[in-house]
Image: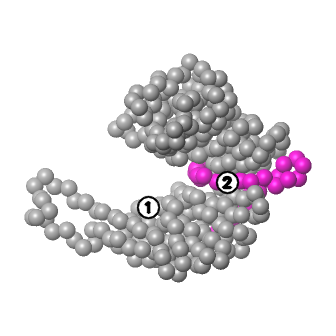
Amino acid sequence: MRPVYVIILFLSILSSCDTESSFPVPEDNYFVKFYGNEGDQEGVDFILNTDGSVVMLGNSRKTVTDQQVIYAVKVDAQGTVLWQHYYGTSLPGDKTAKDIELHSDGRIIIVGEFVNGANDSDVYLFSIDNAGVLQDSVTVGLIDKNGVKSDEHANTLTVISDGFIIAGSTTLQADLISTARNSMHLRFDNSLNEIPEVGPINWSRNYGNDRDEVAVKVFEIGINNFYVFGYSNRIDPPRNGDYNYWIYSLGGDGKPTNADLYAGKTSEDEELISVEISPLQSGPGYILSGTATRSSGETQSYLVKLSSTLTFQPTDILIETNPRIWALM
């Protein structure tokens, strides 16, 4: 057994006069524990509940010949296991957990993917209750106009006012020119029904051209207004086809509404990994982090700070304020 789940919780009591030597540290102020049953476990993400409990999400594989499944475990504030469950056992191929979010109604929403065939991964979205019991699930695999299955990969899940949006990538091409990835943003209502591309209520699933483009995270900014953060190697002067951080906006139909923004140098590849809303201490906006790979092969961390009111105009200029940090001016 080689479980690799580790969680360390520190509950600190701050005091201007007490020190470690004068203030005893209770044994239940922290813990270090491992979770998972026989086989290999991989931690991916977790959520914290108001009662101090934690739900951790990951992957589990019993033996090298077994399929990988999605694993979740809930522990209390002292690290004691309350429940643990496996999901996607009836789906084909390896299952991979990607993101977990807590809905305001108490449901836990999880997104992952599974291998449905050669070059054919599909999205797996499901909800569980506070006891880890599966409530509802849906799988999504796209097919082009010639009936060929495309390859979908999920990155993150966003809870929005009327449902959910999954950000990721798909090889589905509108023009069938190449098998490069397009950015993908699948939208679902609160009952996990996907919003289709045609109908009274419609939503465009993907955006891009014959270059390689990936959506990492979607934020709901207002009614029928969304920001998408990702990375792209689109040739868009002065961009020369190298990878850059990529930001664009969507309307209520899932189609782009403004010009695209890029952050990065033409002399290196920048690939976005995560996006967070900026803390108040550093001003409103978004913090984008990932990697920058130079032509020499050297890789460095790459951080971008954007304002909260992006205008998506050609006059917006991304200015490097130090060797690894950019800001939208």
What's under tag 2, amino acid-wise?
His
What's under tag 1, amino acid-wise?
Leu
Query: Which callout, 2 or 1, points at the residue further toward the start of the chain?
Result: 1
Is residue 120 shown above or below 196? below
Across and down, in percent, residue 210 comes to: 75, 37
Decide whether residue 161 is among the magenta residues.
yes
Residue 223: in sight, yes or no?
Answer: no
Q: Which mark is residue 93?
A: none
Residue placed most toward the observer, 190 or 250? 250
Q: Which residue in the rendered view is the most extreme toward the front?
A: 296
Instruction: Place residue 236 in its image quadrant.
Output: top right
**Residue placed at 50% from the left, 26% from the top?**
318
Magenta stretch, residue numbers: 135-162
Across and down, in percent, residue 14 comes to: 20, 56
Q: Which residue in the rendered view is the most extreme toward the right?
A: 146
Horizontal side of 121 relative to 285 (left or right) equals right
Residue placed most toward the observer, 50 or 228? 228
Task: Identify the element where label 1 is drawn.
Answer: strand
How busy is the neighbourhood of tag 2: few (under 14 within 10 Å), some, or many (20 plus)?
A: many
Mark 2 highlights which residue? Answer: 153
Is residue 251 shown above or below 90? above
Instruction: Place residue 114 in its image quadrant.
Output: bottom right
Q: Which mark is residue 48?
A: 1
**Discs 2, 1 touching: Cβ within 8 Å:** no
Across and down, in percent, residue 293 comes to: 52, 40
Horizontal side of 139 relative to 319 (left or right) equals right
How busy is the neighbourhood of tag 1: few (under 14 within 10 Å), some, or many (20 plus)?
A: some
**Residue placed at 13% from the left, 52% from the top?**
16
Task: Identify the element where label 2 is drawn.
Answer: strand
**Residue placed at 71% from the left, 74% from the top?**
90
Q: In 3D space, how far apart are the residues under numbered discs 2 and 1 (Cα atoms)?
A: 26 Å
